[in-house]
Image: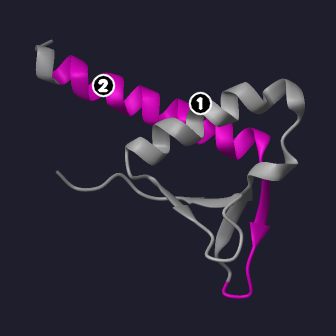
Amino acid sequence: MTKAQLDAMAYELADESAVSDIECHCKRRTSLKSTHWYDLECVDVADWKWVARAVVYLDARKRLRRHPDNPMQVQILEVPNG
């Protein structure tokens, strides 16, 4: 395995872990347009450190969109090309 392949795998694993933390620990809400949002306010205190880390990571990777009326609700975006 090359360094580039290892780096790509590391990003993929980190992305999947962060997405999973949000999907597992946040309440999923559906808007009138059938758009899914994850509510960061409905996280158990014991799980918050995992969710907070996932939010920081996915924000840095440009993989989160905040709800325009409630920034504590997020959408998980697909991995950008390139």
Q: Measured from the top left, where is residue 7 in percent x and y? A: 23, 22
Amino acid type, label 2: Met
Q: Residue 22 in magenta? A: yes
Q: Nearer the viewer, residue 63 or 78?
A: 63
> Would you call the spot at circle 1 few (<14 residues within 10 Å), some (14-19), or many (20 or more)?
some
Magenta residues, start to end: 5-33
Q: Name the main secondary structure of what is drawn in magenta.
A: helix
Residue linked to disc 2: 9
Dot 1: element: helix
Tell me the number on the disc at residue 66.
none
Q: Nearer the viewer, residue 21 or 59?
A: 59
Q: Measured from the top left, where is residue 41 in percent x and y? A: 82, 51
Q: Measured from the top left, where is residue 25 in percent x and y? A: 77, 40
Q: How is the image coloured?
A: one colour
> Would you call the spot at circle 2 few (<14 residues within 10 Å), some (14-19), or many (20 or more)?
few
Q: Is residue 20 left or right of residue 28?
A: left
Quick one: quadrant of the N terminus?
top left
Residue linked to disc 1: 53
Determine the residue positioned at 63% across, 59% down. Answer: 74
Is residue 72 depicted above or below 55 in this figure? Answer: below
Q: Measured from the top left, where is residue 31 in percent x and y? A: 73, 79
Dot 2: element: helix
Is residue 32 depicted above or below 1 in this figure? Answer: below
Is residue 55 depicted above or below 30 in this figure? Answer: above
Amino acid type, label 1: Arg
Q: Residue 25 in magenta? A: yes
